[in-house]
Structure formats: structure tokens, C-alpha cells
Image (cartoon, rainbow, N blue to C red):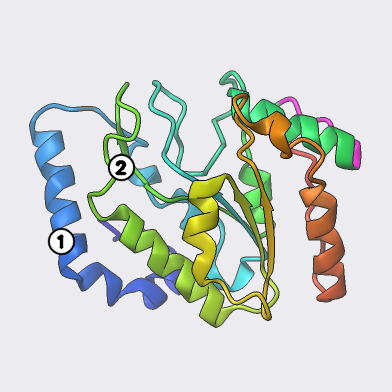
Amino acid sequence: MHRQLEASWLQALSDTFEQEYMRKLNSFLQHEKAQGKIIYPPNQLIFNAFNSTPLNHVKVVILGQDPYHGPGQAHGLSFSVPHGMPIPPSLKNIFKEQAADLRVYNTTGNLSSWAAQGVLLLNSVLTVEKAQAASHQKQGWEQFTDRVISIINETNQGVVFMLWGAYAQKKGNQINTKKHLILKAPHPSPLSAHRGFLGCRHFSQANDYLIKQQKTPIDWQLAEN
């Protein structure tokens, strides 16, 4: 499952992959595939967030819930879609907030250039069945990503955690607020963005904090290809 994992994460998570719940998760995924079910993202992109952002490079964590379940959308980075795909509704609101906050205007939904700068785009659950939202919840991924958050909390210093919506905020309960900055807002989905996500100014706050930590701020302007 994890043979292609980036070296720093592989070292930090090696014991985790030996846990019984991870063995069960692997068996579940193998069974689903054997049944002919289509699973997103493709196998080689399940750990794309980790391979794009090594542990010692993590400066910001944006926590999502599940991968997109439509064809060609999920590529292992929360909220992100590959170049050429339509921008999903929640991401449109993220861009709307960035435009208001920083006058950054993005027109591609591929967030890879954020990941390359140290933004860990982490979903709580890393796989999903085609056209079946939330179909891989409670199979072990949540425990795995809790462990990931715990490792960042323990290992790194001065990380910005953007926790949007009640689900992400609950998952971030273990974070040490003396070591890290937690930014909370409603989820950017069209159902809730108007309740306080729009106007939250998380992106400028994150960069201000990183500068105080003597870290390079994130360039939120996305590369077009």
C-alpha cells in the first residue's frame, strides 16, 4: 500500500502501517478492487499529499474530509483537482476568499504548487468508491490521519492548521495551540461558506504567522499548468 511513500513520511509512519487497523484497511481495499469496484484516487496517487509535501517541509495543513468521487477529479490532494477539470464548489469559495483577502485570483483547481511550498493538503479519508460519497469512512483511514496530525504536532514547530467545518475542527482537537496556530471557520461549501468562511482571512493570517516564525510565506497564486 505504501511502497511509494516519501522517505521522511515512511520513516515516521513505518510502525503505523504495521497496525492491525491498517492491515484490515488494506484487506478492505483489496476486496473492493477484487469486486470490480472503481476506487479514487488511482492507486499511485493515494499518498500524493505526503509525496508532495515531506514531513519536515510542512508549514500549513488544510484538512479535508473525503476525496472527490467523480471521474478524473481526485488526485490525492484535499480540495484539489487536476488541471483541466472544472473547479468544484467548495474550491470556488476558497478562491473567492483568497481574492477578497489577498487579491489573488486563481483559475485552475490544481493545488499542487501549494503542496510544493509546504501546504499539506490532507483528507481525513484517502480513498472513495466511484459515485459513492463517504463510502470508505470508518474503515481505518481516520485513525491513520489522526496519527499523521499527531506526528506533525509532535515533530514540527509553528505549523498553521486550517480547520474548516465541525468535522475538521473535531479532528484537530489534539493539536498543541502553544506550538502551532489553529485557524477555524465554517466549511467553504456553498451550504455554509456564508456563515463565516467568507471573510475569515485565513490566508493572510497564515502568512503573517509564518513570517513571524521566520518561514517563507506561501505564494497562494497557482501555476496555470
Residue 103 sits above or below residue 23 on the image? above
Mark 1 = which residue?
Answer: 23
Whether tag 2 and tag 1 are in contact, CB under 8 A, the answer is no
Along the horizontal axis of the image, is 134 left or right of 108? Answer: left
| Position in image of residue 111 (x %, y %) | 63, 40
Q: Is residue 112 above or below residue 156?
A: above
Q: Secondary structure at mark 1?
A: helix
* x and y percentages locating residue 24 in the rendered image: 14, 57
Residue 43 got which mark? Answer: 2
Q: Amino acid at mark 1?
A: Arg
- Distance Cα–Cα, label 2 vs label 1: 16 Å
Span colored in magenta: 102-107
| Disc 2 secondary structure class | helix
Residue at 53% in and 47% down: 166
**Residue at point 52% right, 43% down?**
78
Q: Of all residues shown, which one is farthest toward the right? A: 103
| Image quadrant occupied by the C terminus | top right
Please identify the dominant SS of the magenta region.
loop
